Image (cartoon, rainbow, N blue to C red):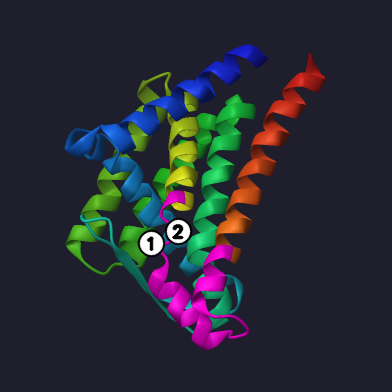
Amino acid sequence: MQTQLHFRVFAMLLVYGVLKFMGGSFGTLLLYPVTMLVTFMHEFGHAMGAILTGGSVEGLQVNSDGSGYTATRGGSPGFVLIGGYLGSAILGNILFRIGARHHHLAQATLLVMAAFMGLAGVVWFESFESTGILWLFALTLTFIALRTRADQDVLMFLGLAAVLYIIQDFNVGPSSDLAMYEKVVGFFPAKVWMYIWLGLAAVLFYWNLHGVFRKKRSAV
């Protein structure tokens, strides 16, 4: 069982690496759902940062080119800003962990993701484009969960690919968040905060992988 999990993770890493670095436009097209998922998780992280610190969310936008934004009011600005990058890293790790270790929760997790995406497109409506993207993604996840047996593998791949995407894109994706974080929090320039955020995401990913495989070995 442990060997099978190692093989599946290795295969997913290989597929992601080939598509990302050697797939060209075809690879970009196949990884497009991952790009959309990462964008949603990033913006959802901002939204949760606002809500958890007493603020509110006025709108959430996901664009077809992979960009997005979240309009919030109140809450802790620093927590809202860091919630985008680290929040999406945490969510990606959770998806991977559930797919790898908690098979019985895979279907329910996909359905919960679909529900959050669908609700976000309505409750935090910003445009028909954004709502259409979120609802299409939500319907696809619902179909996978209810009509296929691929829920575990899809969850593992989406979580793994999302975390790798986040780590690889750290120098580009959160640049505007980092610039604002430097102004709001201070202490360090944006470049230093960039590596701090990256370090936290990398440590979280390592801890997650280590926990998944260590627990599997101890159960044998």
Query: If the image is split into quadrants, where does the C terminus sit?
Result: top right
- In the rendering, at what x and y percent does residue 72 appear? 43, 78
Q: Is residue 77 above or below residue 20?
A: below
**Residue type pointed to by label 2:** Phe
- In the rendering, at what x and y percent does residue 74 appear? 51, 85
Viewer-proximal residue among 186 and 122: 186
Residue denoted by label 2: 170
**Residue type pointed to by label 1:** Gly
Residue denoted by label 1: 173
Q: Magenta stretch? A: 168-195
Is residue 168 among the parts visible in the rendering? yes
Q: Residue at x 39, y 74 (%)?
A: 176
Q: Are marks 2 and 1 in contact (CB under 8 Å)?
A: yes
- In the rendering, at what x and y percent does residue 21 appear? 32, 37
- In the rendering, at what x and y percent does residue 77 appear? 53, 82
In magenta segment, residue 192: yes
Q: Residue at x 42, y 22 (%)?
A: 150
Give the class, few, some or many, for how many residues have Cα within 10 Å of label 1's Cα (few <14, many ≥20). some
Q: Is residue 52 left or right of residue 150?
A: right
Secondary-structure class at tag 2: loop
Q: Residue at x 59, y 25 (%)?
A: 103
- Asked where in the image residue 211 lies, by quadrant, the reply is top right
